[in-house]
Image (tube, rainbow, N blue to C red):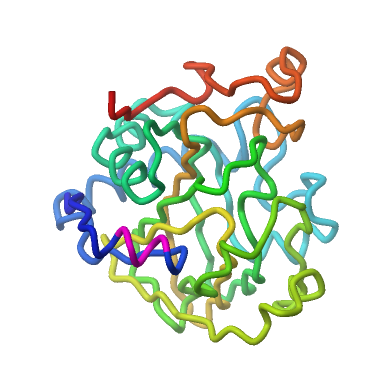
Amino acid sequence: MNYSISTEQINFYQENGFLIIEDFLNKEELNNWRNIVLAAVEDREGIKIPGSMIKTGEDDGINEDAEYFGKVFDQIINLWQTDENVKKLIFDERIGEMAALLSGSNGIRPWHDQALFKKPWANPTAWHVDSSFWSFDNREALSIWIALDDATLENGCLYFLPGTHKETNFENFGIGKNMDGIFTHYPKLASINSVAAPLKAGSCSFHNGLCIHGAGPNMTNGFRRAMTCAFMPDGSTFNGKQNILSDEYVSSLKIGDLLNNENQNPLIYSKG
C-alpha cells in the first residue's frame, strides 16, 4: 500500500480540497479489495444500510425521484458492519493516518463506508458536497475514494471544483438531477474550472467533505466500481442530523454530544 503522505501533498490537499494518489494499492492488494468488497455487496442483497429494509434504488426519503437516482449509482453503506473482511480493510491504521495527516486531525474515526457502483449507462452524479448530509459539522472531515475498476472520462470518474471547500457550508441542499443545481446556492463558484480525476484501478483520491464534486455518466457497457469511506476527525459533535445513525442511537444523543461511540465510529488512528 502506497500510504506515505508528503508535505507537498498535504499542502496541495489543503489548498485544493482533494488529492489523487496513484497506485495506492498494488495488484495483489487490489484483487483482495475487489474480491472482498464484491462478496460483501452480494451478501447484502441490495440492502442499502444495516438495520433498514430499503434497497439501493428505492426511495430513501433523501431524493424525490427514486427512479432517476437509482440509475446514478448503486450505494451500499457500512459494509464493515456486516462483513469482517471489509472491517479489516476500512479500519487499517495506515489509511487512518493518511486521513489524519491530510486533515490535520489528531485522531480519525470512520463515519461510514460505501460501495459506489455505476452500472452501464448510469446517470451522472450532480455537483454536491458530502458534509451537509452527515451528523456532525467539521470542516476537516474527508473521504477516500478507491477505484476498483479504471475510472475514466467515459465511465464516470470524479470531477472536483478546486478550493470550494473554503467557501461552502453545512446547509443540506441535497443532490439534484441538474449538474448546475448547486450554483443556485453558491453562484460565485460557477466560474471555477472543474478538474477531472480519472483513476487507474487501485489508485485513490481523497477529498474534503465540503469540496464540491460530482461524476460524469457511464457512457460504456461496463461497470465503474469504487469503494469509499468518509472519515470524521476525533472530537466531532452531534449536529442533530440522523444520517446513517440508528433511531436508538439518535434518541440517546443531544446536539453537542461527542460522537465517540466505539461500536459506531471507532477510533482507528490517534497521534497520541
Image point 76% across, 57% down: which residue?
Answer: 174
**Residue that lies at the very extreme toward the right in this rendered image:** 64
Q: Which quadrant is the C terminus positioned in? A: top left
Q: Is residue 79 visible?
A: no
Q: Compare residues 133 and 136 and report the one nearer the observer.
A: 136
Q: Is residue 11 magenta?
A: yes
Relative to 208, 179 lies left or right: right
Task: Please state the horizontal and vertical placement of residue 11, each as a whole percent of the image.
Answer: 33, 63
Picture coordinates of residue 108 (x, y %)?
40, 33
Identified at 29% across, 65% down, the residue is 201
**Residue 12, percent across and down?**
35, 67
* Residue 38 among magenta residues: no
> Residue at image x 33%, y 71%?
199
Total count of labels:
0
Dominant secondary-structure state across the stretch colored magenta: helix
Which residue is located at x 35 percent, y 51 percent? 102
Magenta segment range?
10-14
Q: Nearer the viewer, residue 179 or 164?
A: 164
Q: Is residue 143 above or below residue 17?
A: above
Q: Does residue 85 appear to the left or right of 163 in the view shown?
A: left
Judged left or right of residue 226, residue 122 is: right
Tell me if I can see residue 129 in this picture. Answer: yes
Left or right: residue 203 compared with residue 207: left
Q: Position of residue 100 (x, y in %)?
A: 35, 41
Q: Is residue 194 above or below residue 34?
A: below
